Amino acid sequence: MSLDKATVARIAKLARIAVPESELESLAGELSGILTWIEQLNEVNTSGVEPMTSAVAMTLRMREDRVTDGGDPEKVLANAPERTDTFFVVPKVVE
C-alpha cells in the first residue's frame, strides 16, 4: 500500500501530531514500508493455530472470594489534597 503526502497529512491531523511539510514525503515512504510489511503478514497461514494470551502456557491461581468490610473512608481520604464529603476532587479531564 502506498501513501501520498495528503494522506499522511490527514493522518497526522487526526492524530493531532504536528508534522512539517518538509517531512511529509519521507514519512509517507516510511509508513508505506510499514504497511507493506503488515500486508506480508496476511499471507502467513494461521489455520489451526490456537489464539494465545501469553507465550507461556499457564493457569491463573484462584483466590477465595470473600467479603471484607471495605475499609474506612476517613483513612483513605486522609492524605487527599482536596475532597468533598467522602470523594476525591480531581481536575476536569473532558474538554
Image (tube, rainbow, N blue to C red):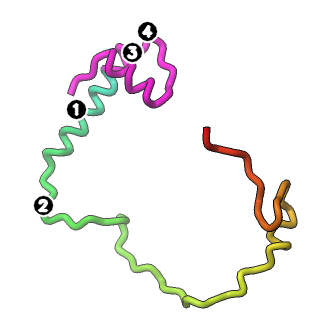
Q: Secondary structure at mark 4?
A: helix
Residue 36: which disc? 1
Real-space CA distance between mark 3 and mark 4, rounded to the nearest whole angstrom? 6 Å
Residue in the image at 28% along x and 17% along y: 4
Return the disc, 4 or 2, that comes first in the chain's sequence: 4
Q: Using the image as rendered, state which of residue 46 and residue 11 is in the foreground.
A: 11
Real-space CA distance between mark 1 and mark 2, rounded to the nearest whole angstrom? 22 Å
Q: Using the image as rendered, state which of residue 68 and residue 26 is in the foreground.
A: 68
Return the disc, 1 or 4, that comes first in the chain's sequence: 4
For the residues bearing labels 3 and 4, Cβ distance under 8 angstroms: yes
Q: Is residue 3 magenta?
A: yes
Residue 58 in the image: above or below residue 67: above
Residue 94 in the image: above or below residue 60: above
Q: Which residues are magenta?
A: 1-28
Horizontal side of residue 17 vs 78, given as left or right: left
- Disc 2 crowd, CA 10 A, few/some/many (<14, 14-19, 20+): few
For the residues bearing labels 1 and 4, Cβ distance under 8 angstroms: no
Residue 22: which disc? 4
The type of residue carrying mark 3 is Leu
Quarter of the image with the C terminus is top right
Horizontal side of residue 71 vs 9, given as left or right: right
Real-space CA distance between mark 3 and mark 2, rounded to the nearest whole angstrom? 38 Å
Residue 48 in percent (x, y) is at 14, 65
Real-space CA distance between mark 4 and mark 2, rounded to the nearest whole angstrom? 44 Å
Q: Secondary structure at mark 2?
A: loop
- The residue beneath circle 2 is 47
Q: Using the image as rendered, state which of residue 1 and residue 37 is in the foreground.
A: 1
Residue in the image at 74% along x and 51% along y: 90
- The residue beneath circle 3 is 24
